[in-house]
Image (spheres, grey):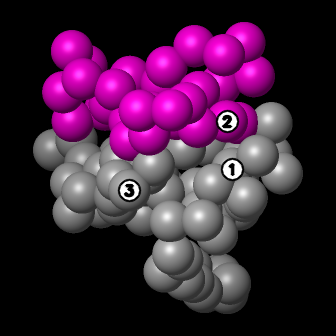
Amino acid sequence: MVSRKPIVFAELGLEERKLLLRAFDYDVDDDGYVLDAAKSKIPSQENPRDFLKVENAVLAPGSLKVVDSSPTSISKLIREAVGINGDSN
């Protein structure tokens, strides 16, 4: 059996989130949207027509990927981390 490190999530306040994002080359604009290194808004994985806002963004543990904080996105992140792709094949 393969031993894996546990995935740990910590909830941060809004200002702490902004500081953490900025530390990893992301930014937050005046309207609260998360920006990538090229200063482009990051599309939501839940609804690609929307963009991630800082209050709904998660910096994925073990990576520098920013994703939605929705249960669906978190579930997908965990499945990817443990190597489960969700396919029935």
Query: Which residue position holds label 2?
Result: 27
Query: Which residue position holds label 3?
Result: 55
Q: Name the secondary structure under disc 2.
A: strand
Label 1: few (<14), some (14–19) or many (≥20) C-alpha neighbours in 10 Å: many
Q: Residue 74: which numbered mark, if any?
A: none
Would you say residue 79 is visible in this rendering?
no
- In this picture, is 3 found above or below 33? below
What amino acid type is highlighted by mark number 1?
Leu
Give residue 27's quadrant in the image. top right
Label 3: few (<14), some (14–19) or many (≥20) C-alpha neighbours in 10 Å: some
Give residue 84's quadrant in the image. bottom left
Residue depicted at x 50% and y 65%: 14
3 or 2: tag closer to the N-terminus: 2
- In this picture, is 29 found above or below 57? above
How far apart are the two marked residues, 3 and 2, measured between alpha carbons?
13 Å
Depth check: give the residue in front, 73 or 33: 33
- Chain part drawn in magenta: 26-53
Query: Which residue position holds label 1?
Result: 21
In the image, is 73 to the left or to the right of 10? left
